[in-house]
Amino acid sequence: MTKLAYLECPTGIAGDMCLGAIANAGVPLEYLIEKLKGLGIEQEYQLRAEPVHRNGQLATKVYVDLSANDHHHERHLPEIEQLITRANLPPRAEAWSLAVFRQLAAAEERYMAFLHSRFTFMKLVL
């Protein structure tokens, strides 16, 4: 049986919150770990989960612990696209993942252009 969930997040959702909701809905953490191995970056992080109480609600908190001995770097869109296309994801998951990161890149580009248009030169002598 296929199960489908819709997330309505008008102000966004943090990755650990999303993973916590998925785990709390019944997706085993081991399954997520196994699927994420396809990205080829499993040496950079470790996932762990624990039940927590938040505002009287029982929830699952998923922690993404970054490896202390790994030098993390910023990833640009082409590298992220490469990770996704090499991950052997189902075609729809790959297409949606690429679309999400491309939208994020476009939004970041607009935001950075906005910041640059508002930049003030403080001690500029002409």
Image: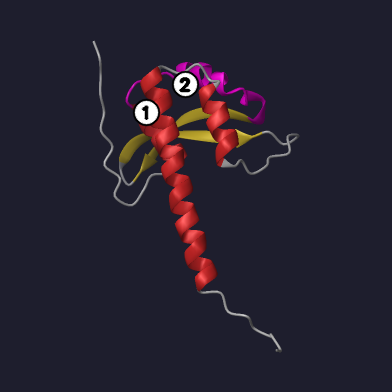
Is residue 42 a member of the stretch shown in magenta?
Answer: yes
Instruction: Check disc 2 and give the amino acid type.
Output: Leu
Q: Which mark, by number, is residue 22?
A: 1
Q: Earlier in the sequence, mark 2 or mark 1?
A: 1
Residue 21 sits in quarter: top left
Q: Residue furthest bottom?
A: 126
Residue 32, horizontal then vertical, whole percent: 47, 21
Q: Is residue 47 visible?
A: no
Residue at image point 57% right, 27% down:
83
**Pointer 2 with pointer 1, Cβ within 8 A:** yes
Residue at image point 46% right, 18% down:
89
Q: Is residue 67 above or below residue 32?
A: below
Residue 11, horizontal then vertical, whole percent: 33, 52
The magenta segment is 25-44
Read off the residue under disc 2: 32
Count of numbered marks:
2
Q: Residue furthest front?
A: 126
Give the overall secondary structure of the magenta segment.
Answer: helix
